């Protein structure tokens, strides 16, 4: 039991130490941070991020975040750089160098080369008097009070703080570029967000002869047959010129029968809902789902610019495509 309590206490201590390291960064977000954002925004090339060991791992994560939020970035391993990979760096690039000490030998070997290539350098370091800090155009302070490692050997709080600062920089750039959810989806077409933000109603709706259609004056029994044969739980009711006049749904039929109405001489026009909720062609599927949930309906008619039915969309098709309510937010 004592060992379990000790583990819990140590876990809480680590979270506290790392949380404090991140919290300290907020006070340092100032002019130098704004300078780093401007430097990258004005960059005509790419952002090159480099670091050794754990800093290299953090560098790769920041690269991934920047690429997915509209800032082109690549990772450069310092050891590989001196064996040819330095060729990826071009004048006009911005290089972000990450080093807790600011005196990492492999990284320091590259600094004169970066200067020769005439690239701008942003330094992430915990040592503001280091070699990295001295040559950087912009220095961002990621110093910490203590590592969570009791021997001060394994980078823990320092890597967490560096990662948080990288996220802050990436999101500040996203904000300045006005990078939208739709832009994000373009870089993630295979994910849930991509499906939600790229999929249009036109790709999912029932079209052509599969659209249930009746005229206003047909007997209700014919409308029911049309609904049954098309299996959408509804039928559109069209005027003589083909424009949408109304819709009949399963719910309309249930309410009619519950009222005890004699349906012998009832026509579609009598039962239909006039001016039903519709959506335009080209609308995002997620918007259609929001509309359907807002009005508590399970089908919606997709219309063209002349208010003619171009298709019918059922909520089940949206859910099957992964655009369900539990995946938004």
Image (cartoon, rainbow, N blue to C red):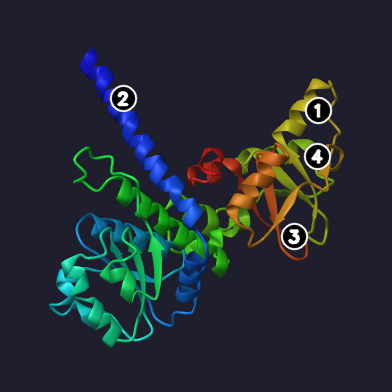
Residue at which label 2 appears: 9
Mark in the foreground, 4 or 1 = 1
Residue 286 as seen in the image, left or right of residue 89: right
Residue at which label 1 appears: 256
Instruction: Please rate how many residues cluster around mark 1, counting C-alpha atoms within 10 Å: few if below 14, some from 14 to 19, many from 20.
Output: some
- Residue 171, how many percent across, how many down? 49, 59
Residue 22 seen anywhere in this rendered image of the structure: yes
- Mark before the other along the chain sequence, 2 or 1: 2
Residue 113 as seen in the image, left or right of residue 95: left
Mark in the foreground, 3 or 2 = 2
Residue 197 as seen in the image, left or right of residue 97: right
**Furthest-front residue in view?**
129
**Furthest-left residue in view?**
83
State the SS at label 1.
helix
Give residue 308's mark. Answer: 3
Instruction: Pick the quarter of the image with the C terminus.
Output: top right
């Amino acid at each position: 039991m004592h060992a379990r309590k000790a583990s819990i206490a140590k876990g809480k201590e680590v979270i506290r130490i790392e949380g404090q390291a991140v919290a300290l960064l907020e006070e340092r977000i100032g002019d130098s941070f704004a300078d780093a954002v401007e430097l990258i925004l004005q960059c005509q090339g790419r952002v090159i991020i480099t670091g050794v060991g754990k800093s290299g791992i953090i560098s790769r994560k920041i690269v991934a975040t920047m690429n997915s939020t509209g800032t082109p970035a690549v990772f450069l391993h310092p050891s590989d750089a001196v064996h040819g990979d330095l060729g990826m760096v071009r004048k006009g690039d911005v290089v972000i160098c990450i080093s807790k000490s600011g005196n990492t030998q492999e990284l320091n070997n590259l600094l004169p080369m970066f200067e020769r290539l005439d690239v701008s350098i942003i330094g992430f370091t915990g040592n503001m008097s280091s070699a990295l800090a001295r040559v950087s155009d912009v220095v961002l302070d990621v110093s910490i009070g203590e590592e969570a490692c009791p021997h001060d050997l394994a980078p823990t709080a320092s890597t967490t703080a560096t990662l948080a600062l990288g996220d802050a920089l990436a999101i500040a750039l996203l904000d300045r570029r006005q990078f939208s959810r739709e832009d994000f989806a373009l870089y993630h077409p295979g994910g849930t967000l991509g499906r939600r933000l790229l999929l249009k109603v036109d790709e999912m709706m029932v079209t052509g002869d599969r659209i249930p259609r009746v005229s206003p004056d047909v007997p209700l029994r014919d409308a029911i047959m049309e609904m049954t044969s098309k299996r959408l739980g509804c039928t559109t009711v069209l005027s003589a010129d083909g424009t949408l006049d109304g819709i009949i749904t399963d719910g309309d039929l249930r309410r009619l029968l519950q009222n005890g109405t004699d349906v012998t001489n009832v026509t579609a026009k009598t039962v239909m809902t006039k001016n039903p909720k519709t959506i335009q062609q080209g609308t995002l599927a997620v918007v259609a789902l929001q509309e359907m949930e807002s009005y508590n309906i399970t089908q919606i008619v997709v219309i063209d610019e002349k208010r003619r039915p171009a298709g019918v969309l059922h909520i089940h098709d949206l859910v099957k495509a992964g655009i369900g309510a539990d995946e938004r937010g």
